[in-house]
Amino acid sequence: MAAIVLLLVSLLPVLFLFLFLKEKTKQKPRLNLPPGPKPIPVIGNLHQMSHDLPHKTAYEFSKTYGPIVHIRMGQIPSIVVSTPALAKEILRNQDLVFCSRPPLTVLRKYSFNGCDVAAAPYGEHWRNLRKIFILELLSNRKLPFFRSSRQSEVDQMIDSIRTRSDQDSPVNISDLMVRLSSSIVCRVVFGYKSKGKYGERSGFHDLLEEGNALFDTVFLADYFPRFGWIIDWFTGARLRLERNARQLDKFYNQVIEEHKISAAAAEKGQDLHDEDFVDVMLRLGKEEGSTITKDHIKGAIMDVLVGGTDTSASTVIWGMAELARNPRVMKKAQEELWSVVGDKGKVEESDLPQLEYLKLVVYETMRLHQQSPIPRESMEQCKVDGYDIPKGTLVFVNAWALARDESSWENALEFRPERFIPYHSWICHLQEKPSVPCAQEQVGTKFTTQKCNFFCFTQDVIGFYTYELCTLIYIPIYTI
């Protein structure tokens, strides 16, 4: 075994030399590409972008080379845009050119080869799944169906904080929020009967945590299609991915079969208000002309679990961190909370529409602490800002830079929720000066609404407890 490993390592320099000479001798059409840093032979600019803060590196590149920067991620041509105007050009004006997702290793594996919304290429399948998400999971008429489960989970979290506070024990709010959002999402997806069955001790949450870590892993096969997969297997990254995906697939198959048995045993004319997300997907899959397969259901489950858990939790965690750093905003939010909640002692869902300032806090938190958008891929050659963008180019929108664009946001680094007054103008702000990429706008807007509700719903913590940041704060959520 050691001899085989030694042989593979010794062959790598020869392979790199071969690829370098092949690139040098290849006849390429002359294109007016965007400016950018000079790439190193074979690896391109990958060494500059593969560390923990690539968004800051890209931001520094934009100061030198302009708002659109050309880089080479290994053998893959890529561009990074860092201004709202160019983000709007790519995400809205030329959306049909840039609406496809690149076939990244981790996306292909967890989406069951594109059988979901996040990684599926633009087309009829993507539109149908998006419609299901909007109508069956994120619509206002669906929210009351999950009210009791949300309230139950939040009450348990508050009781846990109260108990530990009485014991003068430190409380890890980050960990609590991740667990809370995970529990709520699991009950929405798997149903009320999932409480305990898919809880922390079931091992399922460990699988999800490992999956989230793999989403943050660089797979060289994505940037060196000819030989990167060999290195991924050699480093063990691909083995981890295959093992985790296999375990999740087994779990999802078990869940789907259990729901099929429950549906078959249910009495005819059962109240559909008791449906969870898996039930909905199975019901729609039985309709005449439906193209929904088991892989589509599993891909949709993965979208909801990954997108609904970390994104909601990270918004709350970053929001609470910003409140602790800004006493003026904290005081204003607490005063609003006290005036709305009164003597009840806790936030109820009926209070959410009245918590307008807290919604502004959410919007400002999402502006400064964006989720990293999934890269896009150009489906055909086109022009952006006068530059040629070849077909198959990887496209990164640097949301971190957009949120700090001084031409769009006055005192962009300041945490000032009042900038979004009136609060319902938030979407209008994005349309005129998008600090965040508004791809798949309807779905994104609906998820934003759910984040607002989740944030406000958990704010018994800021209303009735005093908290502060640790000397060193590390938030293990995959944001930028």
Image (tube, grey):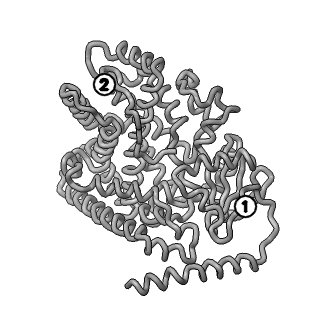
Location of residue 316 by image quarter: top left
What amino acid is found at the position of numbered circle 2 in the picture?
A: Glu
Question: Residue 29, image x and y in percent?
Answer: 80, 71
In the drawing, does residue 261 fall left or right of residue 363? left
For the residue labelled by badge 2, is the local secondary structure a helix, a strand or a loop? loop
Dot in front, 1 or 2: 1
Location of residue 18 by image quarter: bottom right
Residue at the (20%, 51%) spot, across then down? 201
- Residue 113, compared with residue 63, is above or below; it is below
**Image quarter of the N terminus:** bottom left
All told, the count of numbered labels is 2
* Number of other residues with Cα within 10 Å of mark 2, as a class: few under 14, some 14 to 19, many 20 or more: some
Question: Residue 169, image x and y in percent?
Answer: 23, 31
What amino acid is found at the position of numbered circle 1 in the picture?
A: Lys
Residue 354 visible here: no
In the drawing, does residue 154 fall left or right of residue 131? left
Residue at the (35%, 29%) spot, across then down? 457
Residue nearest the viewer, comparing 453 with 330 = 330
